[in-house]
Image (tube, coloured by chain):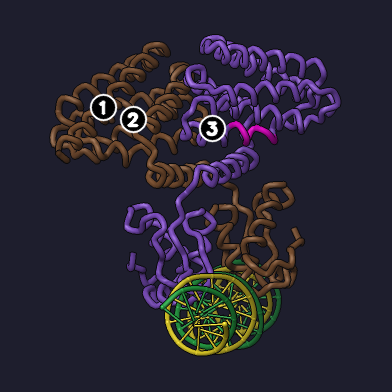
Chain colours: A purple, B brown, C green, D yellow
Amino acid sequence: MKIDPQNPADLSAQIAQAIKQAIVSGELIVDARLPSEAELADQFQVSRPTVREALKRLAAQSLIRTQRGASGGAFVNRLSFEDAYSQQITTSTLLLSMNAVSFDTACEARYALERACAPLAAERRTPDQLATMRAEIFRQAQPGLSDESFCASDVAFHRALVDGAGNPVLSYQLAGAVEAMQPLMNMITFTARSREAIIALHTRIADALEARNAEAIDEALVELEAYTRQLARDVAERRRKQAD
Amino acid sequence: MKIDPQNPADLSAQIAQAIKQAIVSGELIVDARLPSEAELADQFQVSRPTVREALKRLAAQSLIRTQRGASGGAFVNRLSFEDAYSQQITTSTLLLSMNAVSFDTACEARYALERACAPLAAERRTPDQLATMRAEIFRQAQPGLSDESFCASDVAFHRALVDGAGNPVLSYQLAGAVEAMQPLMNMITFTARSREAIIALHTRIADALEARNAEAIDEALVELEAYTRQLARDVAERRRKQAD
DNA sequence: CATTTTTTATTTGTCTGACATTTAAAAGTC
DNA sequence: GACTTTTAAATGTCAGACAAATAAAAAATG
């Protein structure tokens, strides 16, 4: 963790990399205190602002946290699932919006992953998760609900399904896929009829989950995916006609 | 993007958040140039080092890139799939190592996701991907291969399978799950016999993929998961006995 | 002696000002 | 017109200073 090439460019990036390496390799364990900024500046033979820039890089990745005052300093942070969630969601969202990923591609990925959860969720879902899903279905049926709120409820419904698998790693991985889709979904106008169809499918999923019937969940998800993609195609079609 | 509360703590975090928001919301598009550090310092009414800390936070997330010289500055970065991969891999790796996620939990998540790819891969796999998998199987059969190299080849094999689905979003999502498992897998000592069994299953997967037989891939993956978890249990058992 | 208050030292957070380095464009030169 | 030199703008780095928070040590108080 001491090495630093003579290349006097991007010093803060190099220092951040060195410390990150020490954390990943286990040399610095959770809650370990890093040397003070002044000491690090001494060790790396750079100025304190440079060290600070390096530390901020690490803080941005939730790798460290800082505390002021005596016996304060920078500490190795235990990366929580929540931190990882939110990082993954912004990364996924930007990835989709900046790289012109087609709706179909994103949709396919999302439902493929979600279907992977279905068998586990059928086995392990709790009454709480089922209740959450029923509540979201109820909300989705409210008249006068905005498209954004409908989509947000849709996300909550599917997150409950994913959480039903009872595997935090799966939940974390899928958070990105499900939530990153929301901006794309928001571009769809949900007519009363399409909402009705989606709610019917959601109800089928909830019923199947209650009955712990994995195959039925899978079937409903396949139909939901097909229907969602059809809706997106219709929107694209309508836009094309409007352009003429 | 101008607002900043009077709370004079974590100014750089607040500024980073404001700029990040502007990027996510689309107010700042890809390749747009941010104001110079001096201008930002003026706008936010802070000093240049504070602005710099904020920019380094964003750079750490690959949200911006900087360029020196005249007509240089900070530019909104197009988040590439590669950048997202590597971020996700380190995040996933740390999440697993810091939160004492059990081998079973991680393994379950990984294979659930991988099985989600199988039907798509059966349909779309290219000859290149198949060749990669065959080559990795060949490497795995080499005598004298270290456990680390065996695991690395295993990762490469499974990544080729995942890439076979031809969906970059899926590949990105799964990169974390597959690669983050490697440190955990490295703790397993692969005997000649267990390597033989794994290679046999890999061969079955490759054969099934070549024949575009999704069910056969799924079956082999289920067996591979069961076998991997059994190996891990054996290692744990051996350790427990050693402790007595 | 025990408890509370005050002081002090340490550490991060921020600011000011300066210089180095890189780089593209403008100015100059042949 | 093509090439070279100069210049200006921007990031990268440094040094030193002060503010603010905080915990431990010291002092005061009962």
Sort mark 2 into few (<14), some (14-19) or many (20+) by Cα contacts within 10 Å.
Answer: many
Magenta segment main secondary structure: helix
Q: Residue at x 56, y 62 (%)?
A: B56
Q: Which residue is mark 3?
A: A174
Residue B104 at x, y percent in the picture: 35, 30
> Which range of residues does the magenta coloring cover?
A178-183
Q: Secondary structure at mark 3?
A: helix
Could you say which quadrant of the image residue A131 lies in? top right
Residue A117 at x, y percent in the picture: 50, 23
- Callout 3: residue from which chain? A
Q: Which residue is mark 2?
A: B157
Sort mark 1 into few (<14), some (14-19) or many (20+) by Cα contacts within 10 Å.
Answer: many
Question: Would you say residue A46 is visible in this rendering?
Answer: no
Residue B182 at x, y percent in the picture: 33, 39
In the foreground, B44 or A208 = A208
Q: Amino acid at mark 2?
A: Phe
Question: Would you say residue A38 is visible in this rendering?
Answer: yes
Q: Secondary structure at mark 1?
A: helix
Mark 3 touches mark 2? (CB < 8 Å): no
Q: Judge depth for marks 3 and 1 and give the one in front.
A: 3
Q: Amino acid at mark 3?
A: Leu
Residues under labels 3 and 1: Cα distance?
30 Å
Mark 1 touches mark 2? (CB < 8 Å): yes
Residue B47 at x, y percent in the picture: 66, 75
Horizontal arrangement in the rendering, residue B168 relative to residue A228 (left or right): left
Q: Judge depth for marks 3 and 2 and give the one in front.
A: 3
Residues under labels 3 and 2: Cα distance?
23 Å
Q: Which residue is mark 1?
A: B137
Q: Amino acid at mark 1?
A: Ile
Q: Residue at x 70, y 24 (%)?
A: A135
